[in-house]
Image (tube, grey):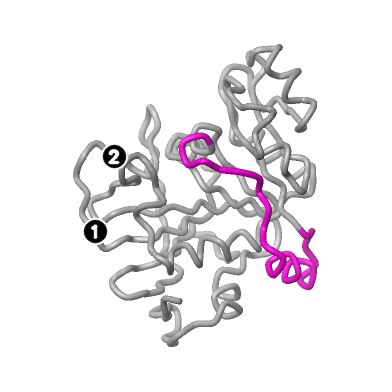
């Protein structure tokens, strides 16, 4: 297992899983965290997938971050591209969550306008908790009916998904701690709406070039000041945690 050490806010070597979990503990109340990996030149993928950029340390933190989540939020396109299955955390994570007053498993929430999801996918058939599908009023009725058999399908916009309504709906269901894993369009939409509280960014020690996009994109710019909250190091890789400037909750 790759050793991870803390550089900020307090230096510490060879962090345990418990220490890492404590360092990433979200504040009480509603909180939306985005988690991404990027190359030094800003590429969000290698050969079309984000998984090729991260190493063992990134994968370790990626799994640990899910433990704090009431809900894991993901764009349907990313779920398809990255080959997501059911959102099922391992038994060790389940025991940890129960010991910390959380539900054994987080809810898996997929964001999609066109409902291009297969109801027979393991995402639904193997899910330990009934997933959520967050969509729009204009979504195809036939696909909506098929997915409603295996998931709770909820409208959160007319023609475009409204991030504010997403957070409102999740909050109404008691899912205050939102852990979002992409993709870039989802991040861009939530950033434009001012709905992002925190970014966890793994900076992979590689230069990629090529056609890969950025971790966030949207039709319009959304300058958002962030404050550096923590820096971890694993070899030549940095794991950065930023929170929205002026937010002192976390």
Q: Report helix, strand or loop for mark 1.
A: loop
Vertical comparison of 18 with 26: above or below: below
Q: Nearer the viewer, residue 34 or 120?
A: 120
Left or right for 223, reference 176: left
Q: CA distance from mark 2 to mark 1?
A: 13 Å
Residue 180 spot, x, y in % from top left: 56, 48
Q: Report helix, strand or loop for mark 2.
A: loop
Residue 84 spot, x, y in % from top left: 56, 43
Asked if the stretch drawn in magenta spans residue 235, the answer is no
Which residues are drawn in magenta?
80-104
Residue at screen point 67% across, 54% down: 177
Question: Considering the image in quadrants, where does the N terminus appear?
Answer: bottom left
Residue 167 spot, x, y in % from top left: 66, 41
Residue 94 spot, x, y in % from top left: 73, 64
Question: Which circle's residue, 2 or 1, is located before the other in the chain?
Answer: 1
Residue at screen point 77% across, 25% down: 148
Circle 1 Cα neighbour tier, 10 Å, few/some/many (<14 / 14–19 / ≥20) = some
User: Splitting the image into 4 quarters, where does residue 131 fall?
Assistant: top right
Can residue 193 be seen here?
A: yes
User: Splitting the image into 4 quarters, where does residue 127 fall?
Assistant: top right
Question: Considering the image in quadrants, where does the C terminus appear?
Answer: bottom right
Residue at screen point 58% across, 23% down: 116
Residue indicated by mark 1? 206
Residue indicated by mark 2? 212
Left or right for 126, reference 203: right
């Amino acid at each position: 297992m790759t050793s991870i050490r803390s550089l900020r806010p307090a230096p510490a070597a060879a962090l345990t899983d418990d220490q890492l979990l404590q360092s990433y503990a979200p504040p009480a109340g509603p909180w939306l965290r985005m988690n991404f990996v990027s190359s030094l030149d800003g590429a969000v993928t290698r050969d079309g997938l984000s998984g090729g950029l991260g190493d063992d340390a990134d994968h370790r933190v990626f799994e640990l971050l899910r433990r704090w989540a009431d809900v894991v939020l993901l764009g349907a396109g990313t779920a398809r591209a990255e080959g997501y299955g059911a959102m099922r955390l391992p038994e060790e994570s389940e025991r940890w969550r129960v010991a910390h007053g959380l539900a054994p498993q987080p809810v898996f929430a997929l964001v999609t306008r066109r409902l291009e999801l297969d109801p027979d996918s393991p995402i639904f058939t193997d899910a330990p908790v009934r997933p959520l599908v967050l969509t729009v009023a204009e979504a195809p009725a036939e696909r909506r009916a098929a997915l409603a058999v295996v998931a709770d399908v909820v409208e959160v916009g007319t023609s475009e998904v409204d991030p504010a309504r997403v957070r409102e709906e999740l909050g109404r269901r008691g899912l205050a701690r939102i852990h979002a894993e992409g993709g870039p369009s989802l991040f861009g939409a939530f950033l434009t709406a001012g709905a992002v509280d925190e970014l966890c960014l793994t900076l992979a020690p590689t230069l990629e070039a090529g056609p890969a996009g950025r971790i966030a994109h949207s039709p319009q710019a959304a300058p958002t000041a962030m404050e550096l909250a923590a820096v971890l190091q694993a070899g030549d890789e940095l794991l950065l945690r930023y929170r929205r400037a002026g937010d002192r909750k976390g």
